[in-house]
Amino acid sequence: MSLVVRARRVVLPHGERAAAVHTEDGRIAAITAFEEAPGDAVTLDDDQVLLPGLVDSHVHVNEPGRTEWEGFATATRAAAAGGITTIVDMPLNSIPPTITAEALHVKRAAAMGQISIDVAFWGGAVPGNAGHFGSMIEAGVVGFKCFLLDSGVPEFPPLDDAGLRAALTELAAVDGLLLAHAEDAEVIAAAPRPAGPSYAGFLASRPRAAEESAIGRLVAAARDTGARVHVVHLADAGALPLLRAARADGVRITVETCPHYLTFTAEEVPDGATAFKCCPPIREAAHREALWAGLVDGDIDLVVSDHSPCTPELKRLDVGDFGQAWGGIASVQVSLPAVWTGARARGITLGQVVRWMAEGPARLAGLPGKGVIAVGRDADLVAFAPEAHGRVGGLHHRNPVTPYAGRDLVGAVLQTWLRGRPVDGEPLGRLLSRGSPGTGRPPPGRPRP
């Protein structure tokens, strides 16, 4: 198949300009002047922008095992509607968790035949499984995720300091990557217990110090082992100086934040609104603004959804109790307009947003075929209307409980193409491994049933 899409505004790696993007057999074959396009080219309106397909490296699909929370069909359909053409699935909340090669095969088998976009997988690092890392890398995981405190599900226990260092020592030998949920269990144990509808009470139960203490432990372990580490879903801007100093000292550490930390503030969360509950929590407005500044300054590397849905019952919307509710925000479909709404208001360009939401996550996950519009890359493209205004609704998530419901956002995804084909609900997606070269082929080996 061949497809040519042209636009007066195309976001390319080195800037934005008018161009025609020519594709052949799923790859970008050429980028020419706007006028150098065949008569059957798709031409975007002058108020529309052509973006690379976004990459979301932090998505909890939950299938198999908790498919009633979310599944591959619904998660990837929602992602495509939001301009995302590749997701990387987190290793927990599904049963079995992805902590062995055999569990990865189970998950890949569950995904095949029902994914609308491409999917890669993180493995899990839990106590005692470091000996499985090699076989999991061989089977296709792109890196490993751990928790430094209780994960919320018993089948995915946290790493203590000895376990963290054992995992990092193993990964350093193969230049593997460890992602960490960085909150300190001892700090949280000493904080007030969350209970009832008070958001202020919930916020007090997950203090800033918990993030800063855990990130400090992660930095120390990474420095001692030489391993690569990544902090997921940073909410506390107070940790940025620590991260900045660690990088200056040669520690190989990267960090992400999420749309909800860039959109909402603790001051605006109503009591009893458990759809807003996530861990670490949405913090005060000063943190939101400092996180935006951290992105602009390069202290934060990428923005990903941390799409972590559950059933409405688990959110305890009936009683609005933050102590009882599951912590996680469903947002994969609205990530781009949510971030663009905030970026546009701050004078930040679409090119910067693309670096944080496409190029950065692709680099983190080791997916060189993804994240930019460039010759040889996958022909993953998005037609985006940056000035369109709309109210959040019509979500494809299995359970559309989200704090974004009814919120007015700027920017609309009009069409998504995966490897040059329009995404229309058909199972066009492929399974990717680290280093997948951009052909869209499945990784070596077939998943066992």
Image (spheres, rainbow, N blue to C red):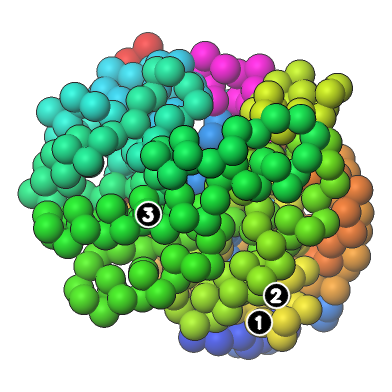
The C terminus lies in quadrant: top left
Magenta segment = 62-77
Number of numbered discs overlaid on the protein picture = 3
Cα separation, mark 2 vs mark 1, equals 7 Å
Query: Is the C-beta separation of discs 2 and 3 under 8 Å?
Result: no
Of the pair 63 and 371, the residue shown nearer to us = 63
Other-residue count near label 2 (Cα within 10 Å), few / some / many at <14 / 14–19 / ≥20: some
Residue denoted by label 2: 343
Of the pair 232 and 194, the residue shown nearer to us = 194
Residue 388 on the magenta span: no
Residue denoted by label 3: 213
Image-based side of 409 in relation to 63, left or right: right
Give the structural element (helix, strand or loop) at label 2.
helix
Of the pair 275 and 402, the residue shown nearer to us = 275
Query: Is the C-beta separation of discs 2 and 1 under 8 Å?
Result: yes
- The residue depicted at 52 percent of the width and 76 percent of the height is 294
For marks 3 and 1 on the same chain, the one whose residue lies earlier in the sequence:
3
Cα separation, mark 2 vs mark 3, equals 30 Å
- The residue depicted at 49 percent of the width and 83 percent of the height is 297
Image-based side of 210 in relation to 398, left or right: left
Q: Position of residue 154 (x, y in %)?
A: 43, 18
Q: Position of residue 415 (x, y in %)?
A: 74, 56
Look at discs 2 and 1 and give the one toward the viewer. 2
Look at discs 2 and 3 and give the one toward the viewer. 3
Specify the amino acid type for callout 1: Thr
Specify the amino acid type for callout 2: Ala
For marks 2 and 3 on the same chain, the one whose residue lies earlier in the sequence:
3
